[in-house]
Image: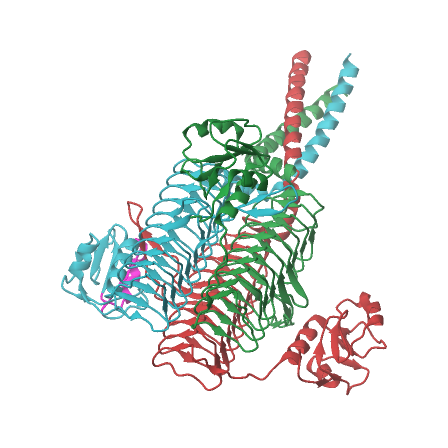
Chain colours: A cyan, B green, C red
Amino acid sequence: MSNISVSLKELAKLTNGELTGDANLLISGFAPLETAEKGDISFLVKPGQVDKLDAFAGSAVIVPIAIERSSVPLIRVDDPYLASAVIHNLLLKKAFVAKGVHPQAWIGKDTSIPEQISVAPFVSIGERVKLGERISLESGVVLGDDVEIGDDTIVKANVTVAESCRIGNRVIIFSGAVIGSDGYGYATDKNGFHTKRPQVGIVQVDDDVEIGANCCVDRAAYGVTLIKSGTKIDNLVQIAHNVVVGENCLIVSQVGISGSTTLGRNVVLGGQVGVTGHITLEDGVMVGAQSGIHNNQKAGAQVGGSPALPIKKYVRAAIQYGKLPEMSKDIRRLKKQMAALTATEEEHKGSTE
Amino acid sequence: MSNISVSLKELAKLTNGELTGDANLLISGFAPLETAEKGDISFLVKPGQVDKLDAFAGSAVIVPIAIERSSVPLIRVDDPYLASAVIHNLLLKKAFVAKGVHPQAWIGKDTSIPEQISVAPFVSIGERVKLGERISLESGVVLGDDVEIGDDTIVKANVTVAESCRIGNRVIIFSGAVIGSDGYGYATDKNGFHTKRPQVGIVQVDDDVEIGANCCVDRAAYGVTLIKSGTKIDNLVQIAHNVVVGENCLIVSQVGISGSTTLGRNVVLGGQVGVTGHITLEDGVMVGAQSGIHNNQKAGAQVGGSPALPIKKYVRAAIQYGKLPEMSKDIRRLKKQMAALTATEEEHKGSTE
Amino acid sequence: MSNISVSLKELAKLTNGELTGDANLLISGFAPLETAEKGDISFLVKPGQVDKLDAFAGSAVIVPIAIERSSVPLIRVDDPYLASAVIHNLLLKKAFVAKGVHPQAWIGKDTSIPEQISVAPFVSIGERVKLGERISLESGVVLGDDVEIGDDTIVKANVTVAESCRIGNRVIIFSGAVIGSDGYGYATDKNGFHTKRPQVGIVQVDDDVEIGANCCVDRAAYGVTLIKSGTKIDNLVQIAHNVVVGENCLIVSQVGISGSTTLGRNVVLGGQVGVTGHITLEDGVMVGAQSGIHNNQKAGAQVGGSPALPIKKYVRAAIQYGKLPEMSKDIRRLKKQMAALTATEEEHKGSTE
């Protein structure tokens, strides 16, 4: 799968790791512990699983710093999960091979095509589109007029980027995603008819963002719907008009974010979360799966449930939820007992008066 | 952005507004208050924000009737939000420019193409398709055999309309939407194998409907899955076979409506709502985001929660949800106290006997 | 709609049914009771609806065994719903008509095309792709390099199957579905930057599976994301990397299944269900709509709610949910009464000492 070889020494340097074993050993592949072969490097996250190295058939292993030695060559790091990603990416890295523009692609007028580009069959590029270097546009991609796309960006098959939207560098947009559909905005008259509010803004996707398959990012009513750099969006996510998603957020599958809501940096939204419009989730907010967020959230807040509560409160409440029938029975019994007691009490009073 | 100029007088007439200022002033653009320039009209919704007009650099403002005068020319209306949509649409209106059929599009046999049409590259149109006037089909659109599309309809890039489905006039279907996929219907035998039930109906989308990006509307098992006129559907919505959606409904993103359910007029479903099959939501029903609807709802009902409750009841219940752990503790304490009291009572009885 | 004729005798034999009426009667169509015409067969599920046969204008009806006779020819079966599906499919069955490869399709090198195939305009097939017999690829389909597709499989318009994924026999993939997008996997460093973990596995879809419109099935990080035979997936479903879905599962619309989770055979997930990662739902588990599953589920478990509870417990709890405000009030009153009683008790004690 890989066609380069890198010495263990270089890999250790790249990951700030400590090396045990032959520094000049060449690594050319990456595989899980169980399936690694000669030339492969693997990784192990939990120190307690060190025994797994006994049956290892590959050449080297990335391990947590707590594992001090082994008969297998090791790169010892603080975070083997991260180091293995860095090394795996390096081993898979290929020089960009420009395939040029396929004769069955369509390029609109006043769009100039860089030399280093791959445009597959049945790609449709609008007019006045600006394209960076080393872009890959797969089959069925449609870029509207005046779209801009930065360097090293990959647009997978059947993606639509509508007119005037701007995509940064090193972005990956997965198949079926739609960037720049109209925001959902209407004004309703007394008869219940809805008049469309024109959606004249754009979508801007900054560098190093990933947008999952079949996601929808709506263009702003005015101005910009903005996905800031480093944010990773899973599949089937809905991002409404004028939303701002901060840097390095993680937005898991099937989340919906309503219009004009702002997310700070490193916000994490679990799967199927819904966020109402016109609110702010500050830096580092974490939201549990399936939650519904109706209010502003302070930096670092961890919330869950619909409507959302602080996560610890939510967990405690969720546990009690299943006990509701029991609680209800208890209350009924208490009321009966109380009625009986009060009656006796009245009697007492009567008798002692 | 706009290429027509309209006098303030005409705009006031169009919106039933009262005019203050120069009736012959020409307006050629629309912009938010903060960014408007000479020639632009803006709007202001809240009377309390009248101070914002002081720094206004545009030419006129649509305001609520309560704002009586200003140094800025005004159109005073009952509903500035609606009036601004009407005016903005007018200013953006362009005559349809027919681009004809691109040589890299494909037209099936027995499909006749009107003169006033735009068919982009890589559009695939089936056999016996009926097309109205001034239709725009963007790149990657696929129309199956026997599809019908009315006048002035826009089908955005990469939309699929499967065989025999019927789309009305002035409809907009956003990118990636799928109209006429098979309904989800199976019969299961004793061994747990599922036999597909043929889905031989169609989808009919009436006039002035919008269907959001990556929506799915399934064809009927028999007959018609029907979206009536004026309804606006947000992105990533699922509409199952044989559903009927009434006129002028608003269906927010990621809603799912199960098979054979009927919605009346002006029903509003919040984001991520789920509606079970074979029920009826009468005219004007409003459902809060993330709710789950399992039962018929009377006209005008407002509900929330999963399973849904009347909205006021739901809101009160949701507030108590977070207090469940406290309630549970209270009940435990009350039971203990009750046990103690009852014991004392027994004692009393013993001692007074 | 149909172009073959089959005798009632043959249809009865096919469905293990008992025949009343003319065994040689030829049936050539299938229609609902209300709209059936001469030559059509219909079906009726509930014995209590036998009166509906009086106005029947078709030729024969599939009925439950409990209906013993009628003036209409009958096929009496255990499960009319299933039998009608089997018969309807037979009547609709058409011989595959190979349209060949459209001149406006693109075939990559080292891909060989079987004689019996239909490849529509603007289909893009990668290199080294392996295609079975009687495959239909609709317009806008993109197959990546090294994809494999079995016999009699239908890939609807605008579907993407990314590189190296394997699709079985008699599979249907509906429009807009994306098979083989990258799994959502990142390693985060101390500064909050996310490094992509390479996703080098594939998706394998076994025989007789249906995958709904705009679904997403992610490729494995390593190894295989697997959908086993006979499983039917509704629209807009998300299946994450390394998930295994067992045989004959039913996964309703808008479900999300997180990474590395395993489903056994005949698992049923209701609409909008979310399932967390790295858990197992054993054979026959049934999950109510909108539920959230966080834990392993034993074979046959029936659960509902978020977080999920055993279904009966969930239903009882959900009923109490709406009564929370009342319960809260009861508890407050009880506490007050208890405080009063305890005070009196203290008094008593005082007075009797």
Relative depth, front residue between A193 and C195: A193
**Image quadrant assignment for residue A210:** bottom left
**Image quadrant assignment for residue B114:** bottom right
Residue C79 seen anywhere in this rendered image of the structure: no
| x and y, in percent, of residue A239 in the image | 45, 49
Relative depth, front residue between B211 and C353: B211
| x and y, in percent, of residue B155 in the image | 51, 61
User: In this picture, is C176 found above or below A277?
Assistant: below
Query: Does the magenta segment cover residue B190?
Result: no
Is residue A92 left or right of B116 when viewed as pictured?
Answer: left
| x and y, in percent, of residue C155 in the image | 49, 73
| Segment colored magenta | A39-59
Q: Residue at x 26, y 57 (%)?
A: A86
| x and y, in percent, of residue A42 in the image | 27, 62
Residue C106 seen anywhere in this rendered image of the structure: yes
Q: Which image quadrant: the C terminus of chain B?
A: top right
Is residue C34 left or right of A43 when viewed as pictured?
Answer: right
